[in-house]
Amino acid sequence: MTDRTNGHGPSDVAAAVELAVAGLDDVERQEQGSTVEFSRTGTVFATIEGKAASYRLSPAVARAALATPDTAKSVRGADWVTFRPAAMDRFALDRAVARLESAWRNATQ
């Protein structure tokens, strides 16, 4: 796995998303109460709320994500999944960042 944190591992999924989104282009960050929304070209593609991150993924990627630990359907819609890892180990970090990048790419389609 590629070290996406430059040796400084985030303590939770919210920190992982904030760290990873800093490396993406054309991202707008907006706070809506206790939720942070990330959008690209006007489309919200990820959110963080507490110790959970939600991602708007392509249907195929969303289905695959639902088969992984700590992932559930999101109340945001059919193409959204919520990731709430029990622990932020390197596997959870990889899933959090990979889903963020997939959602970011998907936001322009």
Image (cartoon, grey):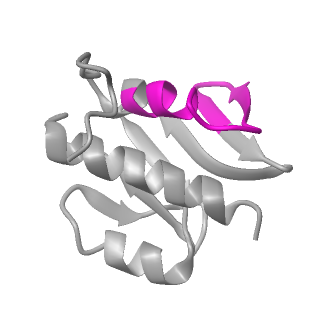
Q: Quadrant of the C terminus?
A: bottom right
Q: Please give the range of residues in magenta.
A: 16-37
Q: Is residue 33 left or right of residue 8?
A: right
Q: Is residue 3 left or right of residue 33?
A: left
Task: Tell me which residue sits at (45%, 34%) in the image.
Answer: 17
**Viewer-side residue, 91 vs 6:** 6
Task: Tell me which residue sits at (77%, 39%) in the image.
Answer: 26
Q: Is residue 72 above or below residue 40?
A: below
Can the viewer see residue 83?
A: yes
Task: Place residue 12 in its image quadrant.
Answer: top left
Q: Is residue 17 above or below residue 31?
A: below
Picture coordinates of residue 99, whole percent (x, y): 43, 55
Q: Is residue 51 left or right of residue 81?
A: left
Picture coordinates of residue 105, whole percent (x, y): 63, 59
Membership of 17 in magenta stretch = yes
Can the viewer see residue 86?
A: no
Picture coordinates of residue 96, whole percent (x, y): 36, 46
User: Residue pushed farthest right?
Assistant: 42
Membership of 75 in magenta stretch = no
Q: How many marks?
A: 0
Task: Place residue 51 in its image quadrant.
Answer: top left
